[in-house]
Amino acid sequence: MNTVFSKGECLDHYTWGDDCHGWTFVDTEVISVKQELMPPDTAEKLHYHEKATQFFFILKGRAEFSIDGKIIELREQQAIQIDPKQKHFIANANPTDLEFILYSYPSTKNDRIEIK
């Protein structure tokens, strides 16, 4: 059976960080697929994953990534892969919303180590 997904018809809607939003479309042990929205001037905490590889595809806005201390900026229609154990975070330092698709394989459930 084929399932059609949208923000209104997803497995889960959640909030994170400073008023950021996420919509889960697929969530299994082997992969998760989410869409996330970050308002202007928001960022997540520095962290890494022991097992998960993450693939970010920018839909709208500009994203600033810190990956192992290196800053990389992505624009709409650009993507980046972050490998396991790479210390990273994403930020939106712009005056408009940032929206992206996030694929994690395997899922990041119980696989997020925050760095203080």
Image (tube, rainbow, N blue to C red):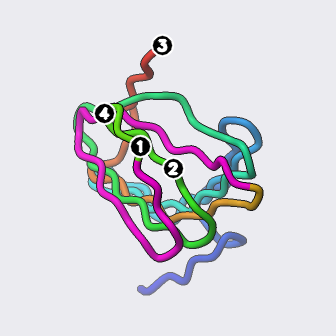
Type of amino acid under label 3: Lys
- Indicate which disc residue 68 carries: 4
Q: Earlier in the sequence, mark 1 or mark 3?
A: 1
Q: Residues within 10 Å of mark 4 (few under 14, many from 20)?
A: some
Where, by quadrant of the figure, is residue 59 drawn?
A: bottom right
On the image, the x and y values in percent for residue 115 come to 42, 18
Q: CA distance from mark 4 to mark 1?
A: 9 Å
Q: Earlier in the sequence, mark 3 or mark 2?
A: 2
Type of amino acid under label 2: Glu
Q: Earlier in the sequence, mark 2 or mark 1?
A: 2
| Residue holding disc 2 | 64
On the image, the x and y values in percent for residue 50 come to 25, 31
Residue 95 placement, left or right of 48: right
Q: Are marks 3 and 2 in contact (CB under 8 Å)?
A: no
Q: Are marks 2 and 1 in contact (CB under 8 Å)?
A: yes
Where, by quadrant of the figure, is residue 35 drawn?
A: bottom right
Residue at the spot x=61%, y=59% of the render? Answer: 23
**Is residue 88 depicted above or below 12 in this figure?**
above
On the image, the x and y values in percent for residue 12 come to 62, 55
- Indicate which disc residue 71 carries: 1
SS for callout 1 = strand
Which residue range is magenta in the image?
72-94
- Indicate which disc residue 116 carries: 3
Residue 84 placement, left or right of 18: left
Q: Quadrant of the N terminus?
A: bottom left
Type of amino acid under label 1: Ile
Confirm whether the magenta stretch covers residue 54. Answer: no
